[in-house]
Amino acid sequence: MGRYERDEVKPFIEMTTQLAEALEVSLDYLVGSTDTLLERSIVNRVLDIQKLKENEKQHVFALLDAFLKQTKLQSIM
């Protein structure tokens, strides 16, 4: 791992993918394309939502929007 950290060698894409999975980060985050670290549990939930029927997605988003709005209002007060 030290040679990767010191930028002396670049890993193959297969190894990079496995490394990202082991570290539970996105490949974009691992290679520095983004500084946004997404939690694996959140990504998995988003993927589950994406599999829902359209009307079911709308229910999930309505609940989520209401919760986020309430949370933002509470943080202002």
Image (cartoon, rainbow, N blue to C red):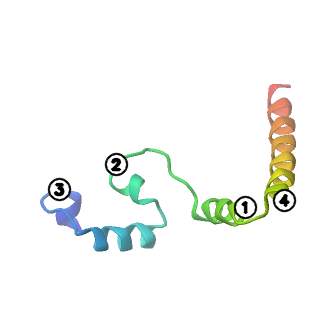
Residue at screen point 36% across, 69% down? 17
Q: Mark 1 vs mark 2: give the one in front.
A: 1
* Between 52 and 36, the one nearer to me in the picture: 52
Distance between mark 2 and mark 3 Cα atoms: 13 Å
Q: Which numbered disc, 3 or 1, marks the residue that appears first in the sequence?
A: 3
| Contact (Cβ within 8 Å) of mark 1 with mark 2 | no
**In this figure, which residue is indicated by the disc labeled 4?**
56
* Between 43 and 7, the one nearer to me in the picture: 43
Q: Mark 3 vs mark 1: give the one in front.
A: 1
Q: Amino acid at mark 3?
A: Asp
- Vertical comparison of 66 with 37: above or below: above
Residue at screen point 47% across, 61% down? 25
- Vertical comparison of 26 with 35: above or below: below
Determine whether the residue tagged by mark 1 lies in a helix, strand or loop. Answer: helix
**In this figure, which residue is indicated by the disc labeled 3?**
7
Q: Mark 2 vs mark 3: give the one in front.
A: 2
Q: Amino acid at mark 1?
A: Ile
* Between 74 and 40, the one nearer to me in the picture: 40
**In this figure, which residue is indicated by the disc labeled 1?**
49
Q: Position of residue 74 (x, y in %)?
A: 86, 33
Q: Which numbered disc, 4 or 1, marks the residue that appears first in the sequence?
A: 1
Q: Position of residue 5 (x, y in %)?
A: 23, 59
Locate residue 51 relative to residue 71 in the image: left or right: left
Distance between mark 1 and mark 2 Cα atoms: 27 Å
The quadrant in which residue 54 appears is bottom right
**In this figure, which residue is indicated by the disc labeled 2?**
32
Where residue 38 is drawn, which disc sits there?
none
Q: Position of residue 48 (x, y in %)?
A: 70, 66
Q: Amino acid at mark 4?
A: Glu
Distance between mark 4 and mark 2 Cα atoms: 35 Å
Distance between mark 4 and mark 3 Cα atoms: 46 Å
Residue at screen point 40% across, 66% down? 20
